[in-house]
């Protein structure tokens, strides 16, 4: 796997300092939340804005590479830090780290940004948000969805794996130490990753604070998964996926994913005549969207909107 800059990424890197802008917005209950905008590189044609929604404990830096690529092709791109993640305020009540609360935060951001028509890239939890958004945003608003390694059926063994590590080993003396921990946890999901990839991933997921590298989320987020055990019912979200059948869907699946199965993908394709599947080799949950082939596939999907 290579992460060398492709031509479009290099074009984005050559832009003026305003290539990435930060913004904040207020949640309905008064938290200050953080987002990032990658303004489109003008190519004479206005392309659909793209809203990027992160995974459970992730932050906007997960989308650096794909956002730079899409902005260089003419798309404005936005990414949001949920409450308790990245640079957003932490919630004093961990029970508010819940999908119904976060969806109101997302809606407030969409309103502030003035997004009249947009596409969504949802990674893991972000994809669950995209499924729910189909009930609130018709295809005239949310025109298409890219589901990054998530679907209406979630394999509980992946939830157990994530729950076992969430909120643990939050602080590391060096970035290399954080990278080594990630490699220990995720090497079976990403067997082709070398030291440079683990180092890059650690840089996305941690921030330097008082000479330590700290994972960028509120550790009380772990309470959300603490009750998950073998007796927990498997989430059934097929009724939400059915709401997406009136707009194009691109499903990205990591070849080694333990959260999104081949069988679930097959059923998603059977249910939706305008759904497409792209399997990303040598990656698991969730694909990092760094490589040129995946970026070009996403751009080609969006080009038709």
Image: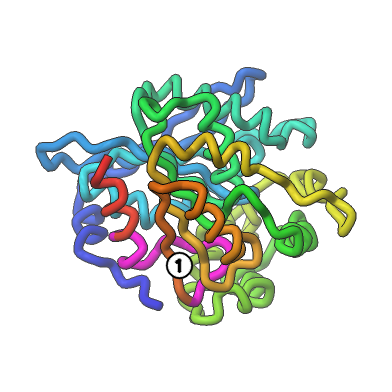
Quarter containing the C terminus: top left
Direction from residue 38 to residue 129 in the image, left or right: right
Q: Quadrant of residue 20?
A: top left
Q: Quadrant of residue 247?
A: top left
Q: Residue at x 64, y 61 (%)?
A: 259
Direction from residue 265 to residue 38 in the image, left or right: left
Q: Quadrant of residue 238?
A: top right
Q: Secondary structure at mark 1?
A: strand
Q: Which residue matches tag 1?
A: 279
Point out the stretch of residues depicted in magenta.
Answer: 282-296
Expressed as whole percent of the image width and height from the top left, the position of residue 76 reads: 29, 38
Q: Residue at x 24, y 40 (%)?
A: 40
Expressed as whole percent of the image width and height from the top left, the position of residue 232 reads: 85, 51
Q: Is residue 196 above or below residue 234?
A: below
Q: For mark 1, does the 10 Å Cα neighbourhood hold few (<14), some (14 to 19), or many (20 or more) residues?
A: some
Which of 240 and 229 lies nearest the eye of the viewer?
240
Is 283 covered by the magenta stretch? yes
Expressed as whole percent of the image width and height from the top left, the position of residue 290 reads: 40, 64
Q: Let me know if residue 197 appears in the view.
A: yes
Expressed as whole percent of the image width and height from the top left, the position of residue 140 reads: 36, 26
* Magenta stretch secondary structure, dominant: loop
Q: Let me know if residue 174 appears in the view.
A: no
């Amino acid at each position: 796997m290579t992460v060398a800059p492709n031509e479009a990424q290099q074009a984005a890197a050559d832009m003026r300092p305003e290539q990435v802008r930060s913004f904040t917005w207020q949640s309905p209950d008064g938290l200050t939340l953080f987002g990032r905008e990658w303004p489109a590189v003008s190519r004479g044609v206005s392309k659909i804005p793209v809203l990027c929604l992160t995974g459970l404990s992730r932050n906007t830096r997960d989308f650096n590479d794909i956002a730079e690529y899409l902005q260089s092709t003419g798309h404005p791109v936005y990414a949001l830090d949920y409450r308790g993640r990245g640079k957003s305020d932490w919630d004093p009540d961990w029970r508010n780290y819940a999908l119904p609360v976060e969806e109101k935060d997302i809606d407030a951001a969409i309103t502030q940004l003035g997004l009249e028509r947009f596409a969504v890239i949802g990674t893991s939890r972000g994809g669950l948000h995209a499924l729910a958004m189909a009930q609130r945003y018709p295809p005239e608003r949310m025109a298409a969805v890219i589901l990054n390694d998530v679907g209406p059926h979630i394999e509980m063994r992946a939830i157990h794996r994530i729950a076992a590590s969430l909120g643990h080993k939050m602080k590391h003396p060096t970035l290399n130490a954080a990278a080594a921990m990630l490699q220990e946890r995720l090497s079976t999901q990403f067997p082709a990753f070398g030291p440079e990839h683990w180092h890059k991933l650690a840089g996305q997921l941690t921030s330097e604070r008082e000479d330590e590298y700290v994972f960028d989320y509120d550790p009380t987020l772990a309470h959300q998964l603490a009750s998950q055990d073998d007796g927990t019912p498997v989430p059934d979200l097929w009724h939400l996926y059915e709401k997406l059948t009136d707009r194009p869907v691109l499903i990205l699946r990591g070849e080694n994913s333990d959260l999104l199965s081949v069988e679930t993908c097959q059923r998603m394709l059977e249910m939706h005549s305008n759904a497409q599947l792209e399997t990303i080799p040598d990656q698991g949950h969730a694909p990092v969207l760094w490589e040129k082939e995946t970026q070009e596939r996403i751009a080609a999907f969006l080009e038709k909107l």
